[in-house]
Image (spheres, rainbow, N blue to C red):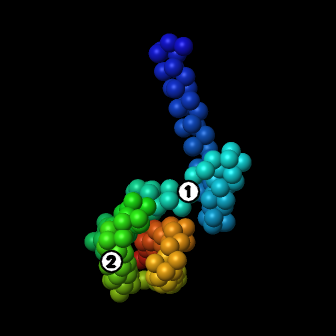
Amino acid sequence: MTMDDMKNEADAASVVSMALYAVMYPVFNQAEKENPGLTQDIVMKILEKKNLKIDYNESLLRMAADDVEEFTIERREPEFQELNERARALKHILSTIPDEINDRVGFLQSIKNIASAIKELLDTVNTVFRKYQNRRALEQQKKEFVKYSKSFSVTLKTYFRDGKYDTVSILHSLLSHTASDTFNGCTGTHQHH
């Protein structure tokens, strides 16, 4: 196979991938909205069927710092942009956990950084609350975020007692996902007049 043949094959695969993405993304996006966790279940079944050994939770953590358009608020008001930044900062810290977890000093510092980032994110959410209407959806997401934050704290204590990394990894993934949901939930708010 020549270099030109390989390039043509890669170009054709790229076109097919883009077309498949254009068709399937809206389908999976809608299915995930209606059945949260469905996409994860599908990916896990594919990995299981192909007998691939991938630490799914670690992979999610490592990708947590990636900017995802669906989880970014496009509103230009300073409070919403700060909310974007606070959530992005928390997700970045969470994405470093797989590298820090075996370094006790580094991991303890990451825990402190996570606690600080959670507080800053919640402070920013409260600022948005004071200024904007349509709080019900955001309030529910905030409650979920706080619940996962507390579970994370309890799980850390278990980790230091028992050394169970998987549980910490899973809760980090949940916390990261919930952080995205929390600031994404603000897009539907409307300013007081």
Q: Residue at x 36, y 66 (%)?
A: 103
Q: Residue at x 50, y 56 (%)?
A: 59
Above or below: residue 168 compared with residue 52: below
Q: Nearer the viewer, residue 66 or 192?
A: 66
Disc 1 crowd rating (10 Å Cα; few below 14, some 14-19, many 20+) is few
- Is the C terminus in the top left, top right, bottom left or bottom right quadrant? bottom left
Disc 2 crowd rating (10 Å Cα; few below 14, some 14-19, many 20+) is few
- Is the N terminus in the top left, top right, bottom left or bottom right quadrant? top right
Give the amino acid at mark 1: Asp
Q: Residue furthest bottom?
A: 130
- Horizontal side of residue 93 vs 144, given as left or right: left
Q: Is residue 142 visible?
A: no
Q: Is residue 32 visible?
A: yes
Q: Residue furthest top?
A: 2
Give the amino acid at mark 2: Lys
As helix, strand or loop, the secondary structure at mark 1 comes to loop
Q: Which residue is mark 1?
A: 55
Q: Residue at x 53, y 32 (%)?
A: 14
Tell me the number on the disc at residue 151. Answer: none
Measure the C-alpha gap from mark 1 to mark 2: 25 Å
Q: Residue furthest front?
A: 162
As helix, strand or loop, the secondary structure at mark 2 comes to helix
Q: Residue at x 63, y 66 (%)?
A: 36
Q: Which numbered disc, 1 or 2, marks the residue that appears first in the sequence?
A: 1
Q: Residue furthest right?
A: 49
Q: Position of residue 42 (x, y in %)?
A: 67, 55
Q: Which residue is mark 2?
A: 112
Q: Position of residue 151 (x, y in %)?
A: 51, 82
Q: Position of residue 11 (x, y in %)?
A: 51, 26
Q: Position of residue 84 (x, y in %)?
A: 35, 67
Q: Nearer the viewer, residue 133 or 123?
A: 123
